[in-house]
Image (tube, helix red, strand yellow):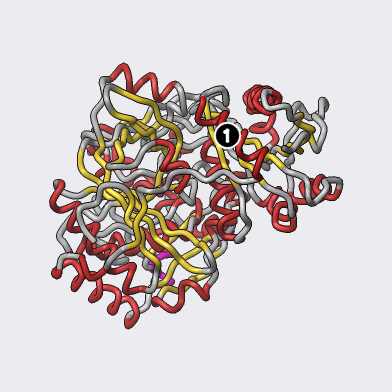
Amino acid sequence: MQREVTLVASGDLRETANRLGWPAQAELERNVGAAFGRHGASVRRAHPIDASRGHGFISSQRMGMSVFESIDRDAPIVVAEAVWQYSHHVLAGLRRHRGPILTVANWSGEWPGLVGMLNINASLTKLGRAYSTIWGEDLTDPFADAAIARWLETGAVVHDTSHVRDLDAAALPRSAAALGRRLAGELAERMAILGVFDEGCMGMYNAIIDDEHLNPSGIYKERLSQSALVAAMRQVTEAEARAAYGWLTRRGMEFRLGSDGATELTEDQVLDQLRLYIAATRIADAFGCDAIGIQYQQGLKDMAPASDLAEGLLNDADRPPVRGLGEAGRELFPGQPVVHFNEVDEGSAVDALVTNRVWTALGLNAATTLHDVRWGAPYGDDFVWVFEISGAVPPAHLVGGYAGAVSERQPPVYFGLGGGTIKGVSRPGEIVWSRVFLMEGRLHADLGRATVVELPREETERRWQATTPQWPIMHAVLHGVSRDQMMARHRANHIQVAYGADAASANEALAAKAAMFDAMGLAVHLCGTVPVG
C-alpha cells in the first residue's frame, strides 16, 4: 500500500483562465486529499501555489519540466484536473516517469476538467505510457473510492470496457461494405489534402497525427500558417463581409450585439469573423484542400475575433456564398461544406473527411462537427450527455437551422477580441458518433450510435448555466454505453457526430463508415449497441 502520492496540476497557457479556474481546482485537490486520506495515504503537492499569480497550476512546458526534475521517477503520481489544461505542460515528465500514474477529474460541467483529463488520457495513450484514471463528483462515491483503493494497492485501475468489440468486417451488410471499400479505394487513388493552419492547438498532443500514419490511406497535409489567414482576411472587402452578414440575418440568425467590445458582441467583431470565413474558404480553394483546420487559440486569438462562427458555417453545405478574388470570381465549393476540423484536431480531420464521403454517397446531409465530451447527468431513465463546443456547429444540426441560431459573445476569459458563436440546441434525431485516435503505434477508430433527445427548455437552460451558456449544446443518449464505460474508453476530449435521416440510415452510414475505415487500414471498434458488424 502506497503511503504518499505526489500531485501535479497542469493548467492553461492563458493566465486569466488559470486564475479564474483556481477555486475549482483547489476544491478538487481538497477532495483528492480527503479521498486518499480515507485509505491512509497522504498527498504531497509537487509545486507550490503562487500567491502573486493567483493559482497553483503548471502553466508552461518549461515549468512542467522543472517540476518533474524534483519528483522521484518511481513515485506514484496523481494528475488532478478541474479545468481545461495544456497536456504538453506535463507530458515530458510523464513520458519518462516510471511510477504509476493516476489521472483524476471532478464530475462537473462548470469548468472543463473532464475534457482536460480526457485529453491527458488520449495523449498518454498516444505516448504508449500506462496510466489509470478516475472521476467523480467529490470522489466519495463507491465507484471512485474503490478505484482509488485499488490504485494505492496495485498501481492500476481496470475499468469495464465490455461495450467495445472489434469490427468483424465480414459481418457487415454487403452493400455498406462494398461502398466503404470503394470510397477507400477512391481516396487512395485521388488523394486528399488536410489544410492545417498551425498544429498543436492548446497542447493537444493527441490531436497531431504524423504523416506516416496518414499517407498510406491517401491523406496528406498542407501545412498552412495562420499569419497567411490574417493576410487573406485583409483582402476581404467590407462589402463582401456585409453581404455574408446580410445573408445570415435574412435566414433568421440573431446576433445579440452591444457596444462594449470588451464584454459584448459588436458588429465589427462579426464582420471580422466573416472575413475569416471568406479568407479560409479562398485558401482552401487555392491549395486544393479537402478539409481545413484552424487553431485559433494561440496567436490568432491576439489578431482576430473567435473563429467559431466561420467554422460552423464552413461545415454546412447551406452557407453564405464565397467567390474567388476579383469581380468575376467563381463561387467556391458551391453547395458543399468546406469540411473543417475544429482546433486542428487531426483525428477529427480524418473522421470528418470519411464522414463527408460516406454521407454524401448515401445521399445524407454531410454536415458534421466535433464536440467536447463536456459533462452529463441523468434525466428520467436515461443518462444524457452534454456535448458542447465553442460555436463551431453547422446550423443544419440545430433546431430551426439558421432561424434557431443565436450568436452571443464568446467569454472574455478565453476570447479577448470577442466574436460570436453559433448557439442553439441540436435537433432530435439519430446520430453516429466516432473517434479516430492513435494507440499502440496505429490509427484506431471507435464508432457507436446515439440518439439526440429533446429536453424541456428549463432543463436545457440548467445544463447551459452549468457549463458554458454561449455555446451550442447537444443532448445525447449513447446506445449501450454507460457514463463510466464512455469515460474509461474514450481516447480524446472530442467526439465526432453526424446525423442520419432516421435510425435505419444512421445504421447504414455507420456500417459503410466502419468498412471505409477498415479498408483504409485502421483498427475499427464498435461501441455499445450497434446492429452491424
Hey, which residue is sitting farthest right in the picture?
70
Q: Quadrant of the N terminus?
A: top right
- Residue 166 horizontal side relative to residue 160, left or right: left
Q: Nearer the viewer, residue 437 or 56?
A: 437
Number of disc labels? 1
Residue bounds of the magenta highlight: 284-289
Residue at the top extreme, as displayed: 458
Instruction: Specify the amino acid type for callout 1.
Output: Ala
Outermost residue to the bottom: 189
The residue lying toward the viewer, choosing from 62 and 518, is: 518
Assess whether residue 94 is covered by the magenta stretch.
no
Residue 39 in sight in this render: yes
- For image coordinates 58% across by 52% down, the residue present is 204
Quadrant in the picture for residue 451: top left
Residue 520 image position (x, y, % from top left): 36, 73
Identify the residue under disc 1: 105
Q: Is residue 478 left or right of residue 416?
A: left
| Residue 409 image point, x, y percent | 47, 31
Q: Taking 433 as reference, is 116 above or below it?
A: above
On screen, 461 above or below 178?
above
